[in-house]
């Protein structure tokens, strides 16, 4: 669904992406993983058309991703995006954060309310929290609101930048379970950034490991373990191996 062909990207003198070739599959989850600064967030921004590549091509459904104009707007309606740290508007309630774009688009009030309640159920956010501002929500609840906002217009694809990054372990495990159920039930194309290999394997069959703006290996977790393509891959896997081999568990019942 998303396709990057020979993509290079510079920030000033720094080469942030150095020839990335990547195809994500429709209806599947792809996980981008790698050390901090390896270019994961940059790839999501290119997929959404927030940035353009300096070289190469970025395609969505076979058409070039545009940065502005009607095609760019159309793309942003088909692709939901949850940015690193959530990115909720602090001065808007959860309800207004989620419904902003639909209202701006002029959707019918009843339809918006129906969709909002549907999403609250899906994201398991108690409806009585919808009137709260982001600062009055926990980190996990904020991430649920961010996910609801990204799903409001029923996009075909979902881009998530470290959606579980800032959460404590128990909340994280709980949200992992919910997120995986959501991805499966919606059958959307998902591209998810994480720096945790266990989490990548938990969500995705297609794992893409980046280093210094280049893909060093991609495939299933089993390939990374059995056939690491470089020393770096072997070290990356063994550093995370203890967690990689034990899948996250559901939190204990209280
Ligand atoms: N707006 C920017 N201006 C200059 N350099 C940037 C900018 N955004 C990111 N970079 C650099 O690009 C590289 C890749 O960043 P990023 O894609 O955010 O990495 P990751 O998400 O894997 O941590 C980093 O070295 C970062 O410092
Ligand atoms: Mg990042």
Image (spheres, helix red, strand yellow):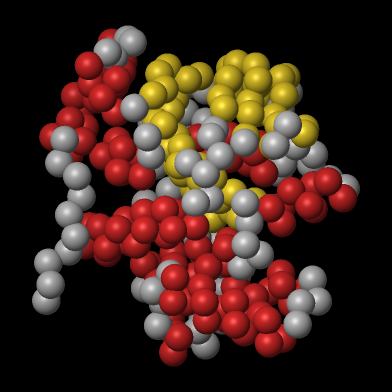
Q: Could you say where residue 26 lies in the image, as x and y percent from the top left?
A: 56, 39
Quadrant where the N terminus sits is top right
- Residue 155 figure quarter: bottom right
Total count of labels: 0
Drawn side of residue 196 relative to residue 43, left or right: left
Residue drawn at (77%, 34%), measured in percent from left and top? 63
Residue drawn at (58%, 61%), measured in percent from left and top? 150
Against 28, is 184 above or below?
A: below
- The answer to which of 60 and 216 lies nearer the viewer is 60
Residue drawn at (38%, 39%), measured in percent from left and top? 204
- Residue 220 figure quarter: top left
Q: Could you say where residue 18 lies in the image, as x and y percent from the top left?
A: 58, 17
Q: Could you say where residue 9 lies in the image, as x and y percent from the top left?
A: 66, 24
Residue drawn at (54%, 55%), measured in percent from left and top? 82
Quadrant where the C terminus sits is bottom left
- Residue 89 figure quarter: bottom right
Drawn side of residue 25 relative to residue 206, left or right: right
Residue 70 appears anywhere in the view: yes
Q: Could you say where residue 7 lies in the image, as x and y percent from the top left?
A: 65, 21
Which residue extends farthest right? Answer: 69
Residue 168 appears anywhere in the view: no
Drawn side of residue 192 relative to residue 254, left or right: right
Against 118, is 243 above or below?
A: above
- The answer to which of 89 and 218 lies nearer the viewer is 218
Against 243, is 229 above or below?
A: above
- The answer to which of 214 and 66 lies nearer the viewer is 66
Drawn side of residue 150 relative to residue 182, left or right: right
Which residue extends farthest top? Answer: 230
């Amino acid at each position: 669904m998303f396709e990057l062909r020979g993509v290079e990207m510079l920030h000033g003198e720094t080469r942030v992406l150095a020839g990335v070739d990547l195809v994500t599959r429709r209806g599947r989850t792809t996980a981008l993983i790698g050390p901090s600064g390896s270019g994961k967030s940059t790839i999501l921004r290119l997929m959404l058309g927030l940035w353009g590549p300096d070289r190469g091509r970025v395609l969505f459904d076979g058409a070039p991703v545009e940065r502005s104009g009607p095609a760019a707007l159309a793309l942003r309606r088909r692709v939901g995006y949850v940015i690193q740290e959530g990115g909720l508007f602090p001065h808007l309630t959860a309800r207004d954060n989620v419904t902003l774009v639909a209202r701006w688009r002029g959707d019918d009030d009843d339809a918006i309310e129906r969709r909002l309640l549907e999403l609250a159920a899906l994201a398991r956010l108690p409806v009585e929290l919808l009137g709260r501002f982001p600062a009055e929500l926990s980190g996990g609840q904020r991430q649920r609101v961010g996910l609801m906002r990204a799903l409001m217009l029923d996009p075909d694809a979902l881009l998530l930048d470290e959606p579980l990054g800032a959460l404590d372990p128990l909340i994280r495990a709980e949200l992992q379970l919910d997120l995986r159920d959501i991805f499966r039930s919606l059958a959307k194309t998902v591209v998810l950034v994480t720096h945790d290999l266990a989490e990548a394997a938990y969500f995705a069959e297609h794992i893409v490991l980046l280093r210094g703006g280049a893909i060093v290996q991609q495939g299933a977790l089993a390939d990374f373990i059995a056939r690491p393509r470089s020393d770096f891959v072997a070290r990356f896997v063994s550093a995370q191996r203890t967690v990689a081999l034990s899948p996250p568990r559901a939190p204990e019942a209280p």
